[in-house]
Amino acid sequence: MDAPEPVIPVVTRGGQEPDSAGQSGGATRISGVSIQHTPATRLWFGKVSNEPGFRSVPHHHGEAETGGYVLSGRARIYFGDKFDDYIDMSEGDWVFVPPHMPHVECNLDRNRPLTWMTTRTPDNIVVNLDDVPDNSLRDWLERP
C-alpha cells in the first residue's frame, strides 16, 4: 500500500489570487485559500470588497457557515423577511452569518471602499437571488 502524498503549506501570493470565486453584483470576492487552488478540503478564506456606496445583490451561502471581519470601512448587512432588519459594523468588528440566510452586504461609506476578510465552510458557495430596489432597504438611501 502506497503512503499518502504529504500535504505541505501552500502560499497564495498577493495579486496572484485566482479569479474563480463565486461573485454577487456589487461585491468582489478573491480566494486566498480554497478547494480550487490549495489542498484545503473544507475551508474557503478570502477577501471581499464593496466599492464606495455600493451593495451586493441579495444572496446566501447555501450550507456554508460564514465568518467575516471588517478589515477597513463601514459595513451593513440587511437580512430577515424582505430584508427589514440590519446590523452595522466598523473596522475591527466580526460577524457570523448562518447557512441559507438571505442577506445584502453594503458599504455604508460613499467615499471609501469596504474590505472584509471572510471564511466559509465547506466552500465559497454563493447563491444569488433576485435584486431588490434600493428604496426597499430601510435607511439605505438616507445614510450619511
Image (cartoon, rainbow, N blue to C red):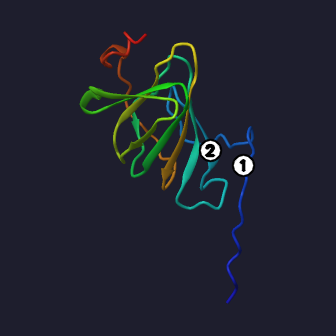
Q: Nearer the viewer, residue 112 or 60?
A: 112
Residue in the image at 33% along x and 28% along y = 86
Q: Which mark is residue 91?
A: none
Residue in the image at 56% along x and 13% along y = 111
Q: Residue at label 2? A: 31
- Neighbour tally class for label 2: few under 14, some 14-19, many 20 plus, Cα within 10 Å: many
- With respect to residue 28, does 96 lie above or below? below
Image quadrant holding the N terminus, namely bottom right
Q: Residue at label 1? A: 12
Count up the numbered dots.
2
Amino acid under disc 1: Thr
- With respect to residue 48, does 41 lie above or below? below
- Residue 95 in picture, x, y percent from top left: 42, 40
Residue in the image at 51% along x and 34% along y = 92
- Residue 110 in picture, x, y percent from top left: 52, 13
Q: Nearer the viewer, residue 22 or 113?
A: 113
- Neighbour tally class for label 1: few under 14, some 14-19, many 20 plus, Cα within 10 Å: some
- Residue 121 in picture, x, y percent from top left: 48, 54
Specify the farthest residue to the front: 92
Residue in the image at 40% along x and 43% along y = 96
Q: Are marks 1 and 2 in contact (CB under 8 Å)?
A: yes
Image quadrant holding the C terminus, namely top left
Q: CA distance from mark 1 to mark 2?
A: 9 Å
Q: Earlier in the sequence, mark 1 or mark 2?
A: 1
Q: Is residue 72 left or right of residue 75?
A: right
Amino acid under disc 2: Ser
Q: Describe the element under mark 2 as helix, strand or loop.
A: strand
Indicate the quadrant where residue 104 lies: top left
- With respect to residue 35, does 16 lie above or below? above
